Image (cartoon, rainbow, N blue to C red):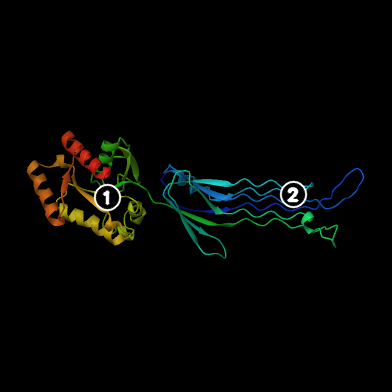
Amino acid sequence: MAFVDEVTIRAAAGKGGDGVVRWLRTKSTARGGPNGGDGGRGGDVVLVGVRDLAALSRYRFEKEFTAEAGGAGEGGLRHGKNGAPCTLPVPVGTTVRITTPGSDVVEHEILNEDEHLTVLAGGRGGLGNAHFKSSTHQNPFEHTDGRAGGAGDIHLTLKLIADVGLVGLPNAGKSSLLNALTRAKSKVGNYAFTTLEPALGEFYGHILADIPGLIEGASTGKGLGTRFLKHIERTGILVHLVSADQEDVVLAYSEVRREIEAFGHGLNEKAEILVLSKADLVSSATRTEKSRALSEATGREVLTVSIEDPELLKAFSDTLSLVLAV
């Protein structure tokens, strides 16, 4: 199933049930006083947070949703049945933008599993004729219809929530590292854009996200563009991978940093761990040279990792777990 991280649907809450005209009937009274009940309330449209990144895929083709209408009132002052809500699952980390006719746009975020958010309220039920009785009006035939429920467009945008976001140019080794650290099943291949959607894995209770590779111009939509930059807005730490087989590792690092800073949204302020990846592809001397070049250009420590070298992989894993434990 294709990964969907942004979609617009149309939804309508249920109409309230109508109030009714009814009369009290007994053996001795053919028509007593008014006793028509009120209509039931229409069902709400409710979003609920789930830990399923594919939840928005349901809305690729199914675009319109309606909650159940409330039931009409009944005699004996009995209320009509309330309409059932229309409950729509969305992934944790979803931003919700609601547009209804004649109202301001409203935005919310769903950040927790099983969090319920009522986005469109069901209509109120109408009044039965019992409400209109007075000392001067003993036999009212008046009643009111139920009100329409809220309706509008709901724009859903998923922004992943993860403790660590793996970033870098395409083919920097992010998927392989995620798989090695977490036993995830992110697609791996020796060509650009192997990863076409974010993938998650668990690392000692922390969530790691493999973010698709960034290229020059990504912040303006080129390549996979802003579709994936938004997914690192909510990550706590960025692990920036620069492949050791890059001819100019400083240029490769700068290219990704430039896109992150151009995108804004606070990404450039996030803590970053700088890593020389795929260290097995170069000699020890070249590895040292490229690590030194990155360190001098950034003023930062550079870690080294290779999924083909158990010692380097374990050292990186231990360092990352210590950073996350702070």
Q: Residues within 10 Å of mark 2 (few under 14, many from 20)?
A: many
Q: Position of residue 88 (x, y in %)?
A: 52, 46
Residue at 22% in and 57% down: 255
Q: Is residue 247 above or below residue 281?
A: below
**Placement of the N terminus among the 4 image quadrants:** top left
Furthest-front residue in this view:
135
Q: Amino acid at mark 1?
A: Leu
- Residue lying farthest to the right in this orientation: 28
* Mark 2, secondary structure of its residue: loop
Residue 82: x and y in percent read: 66, 47
Please provide percent x and percent y for residue 34.
82, 53
Residue drawn at 47 percent across, 58 percent down: 107
3 displayed left or right of 22: left
> Picture coordinates of residue 177 (x, y %)?
25, 40
Q: Which mark is residue 312?
A: none
Find the distance from the CA under tag 2 to the CA under tag 1: 58 Å
- Relative to 180, is 304 on the left or the right? left
Evaluate if marks 2 and 1 touch, with contact meaning CB atoms under 8 Å apart.
Answer: no
Residue 202 sits above or below residue 267 on the image? above
Query: In which quadrant is the C terminus drawn?
Result: top left
Few, some or many residues within 10 Å of mark 1 (<14, 14–19, 20+) = many
Q: Which residue type carries mark 2?
A: Gly
User: Which label is found at residue 73?
Assistant: 2
85 relative to 322 in the view: left or right:
right
Residue at mark 1: 238
**Is residue 19 at least partly visible in the picture?**
yes
